[in-house]
Amino acid sequence: MIPPARRTAHLCALAALVITPLPAVPARAAAPPATLRFGACPDSVPAPPAPERVECARLSVPLDWDRPRGQHIDLALSRVRASGTPAERRGVLLVNPGGPGGSGLPYAVTKRAKLPASVRRSYDVIGFDPRGVGQSAPVDCGDMGGLFAAPGTDPVPAGPAAERTYLTSLRSMADDCAAGAKDVLPNISTEQTVRDMDAIRAALGERKTNYLGVSYGTYLGAAYAARFPQRTGRMVLDSVVGPRDWYDFDVVQSRALLRQRDRFFAWLADHHDHFRLGGDTHRTRRAYLRVREGLAAHPVNGFGPGGFDRAVYRALGRTERWAGLADGLRAYLDDGVVDGFLPETAFDGPDSRNYEAANRIVKCADGPAPAPRRIIADIRRTRSLDPQPVLTGMEASTCAYWQHRPAHRTPLGSPDAPSALLVASAHDPVTPIEGARQLQRLLPGSRLVALDNDFSHGVFASRGNACVDDAAAAYLVDGRAPEADVRCEGPGLPTVS
């Protein structure tokens, strides 16, 4: 999944909130009364345009919802109120940006700014840092088996010795998470987070949770619908992960990234006059490999093949980043500089460390783990398709050595939940569209809005496509789902002037 924007300051003025925990399961039980006190937000939360304002609060929830009288943790919440009249208001819209590990606290402001005006007028937009993330009892896995070493070892093992080193690093990463997270390790999970979401609903005095989730946020939304179908309201799931085990998802994504990178090589060839990286795909691929091989042999100020692969991973997911990646390749080949890769790939701050830790802890808590021999077999299969793949998104490989193995897979979807609106890009390499079609079968009556001729991750209120945005806004505001699945025309690959 795509790393979140960097956060800059510690939480300084969130107001306190204490709420009696909800019963574990019964959907018909009445929520206890709660007092919610919103106040100032931390500096990491941007201010919306005047006269609107963002306000923040804290919510105390059990670390383990099955032991509600035990240890509690605090969740950080944010809110931007609906801008319309009371008659226009439709309730609250809980939002999640993805991950696992993405901070949702500033997302109430940043995502809301992109939503159609009718949605902004209708909903109080609620952001939150999921447990283990950002300002909500953040987890720390320390060095994570050398993940943050600069330049570190090559993240694509080639040969038996490199494969053994790779597995050793996964074991060390799992051990570091066990040592860093300690007793909270099994409770930083999607299933615990959906119960947090229902506590947020109750604290806000709402009967239903209306929800917008992107990427991992779709998995989170589907898990909420599975546990609380009667409390699920209107739900937009954008760029759908799908109902796979996390490791299986990672493998599918790694193969989709190979196809996307081939498109990138062809696009570079079509724009040879601009980027000067070769007039055919063989030459553009060779230019790309020269950059990676050069950084593997001689890292620049600690920037090596791992950092390069992370930059490529991030750029491949959004076509508007392709020109920047191409400029970075050209700058390295011309002058040996890596500045073009660095601004969006800094990997050494507390935000990045928290993201990477939370990502693996959640994935490993959500379902089955792969066997080490399968990990190596899958890497070999991927390398048989292309000797130099991008394996940056293979986070669930760590779960092979996890100390707290989950007893079951996280349930997703429910025939008792209301129909949802699924949104997907036809050629998204990060969350391939097949996942949306698979999840649709677990949410009967749901509709899929697909953006054809598009190759990017994140669609609704992101790609600027009126067909997609109008369909989602009509569903959220008026409850009007399309009568059938919808296909919208996308922008194609970017042009270069």
Image: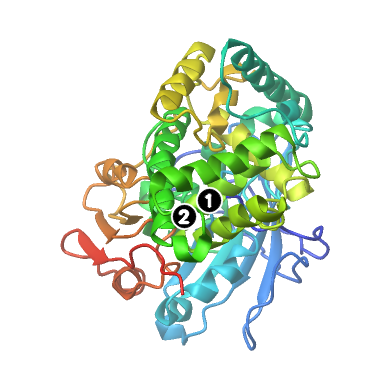
Q: Which residue is mark 1?
A: 98
The answer to which image quadrant residue 46 occupies is bottom right
Q: Residues within 10 Å of mark 2 (few under 14, many from 20)?
A: many
Q: Is residue 423 above or below residue 442?
A: below
In this view of the protein, which residue sits in the foreground, 364 or 155? 155
**Numbered mark located on residue 177 in the image:** none
Q: Are marks 2 and 1 in contact (CB under 8 Å)?
A: yes
What residue do we see at 68% from left, 21% from top? 169
Residue type of the residue flagged with mark 1: Gly
Provide residue 377's location: percent of width, then percent of height: 45, 16
Q: Is residue 364 left or right of residue 46?
A: left
Q: Which residue is mark 2?
A: 214
Residue type of the residue flagged with mark 2: Val
Q: How is the image coloured?
A: rainbow
Q: Is residue 479 left or right of residue 341?
A: left
Provide residue 207's location: percent of width, then percent of height: 44, 61
- SS at badge 1: loop
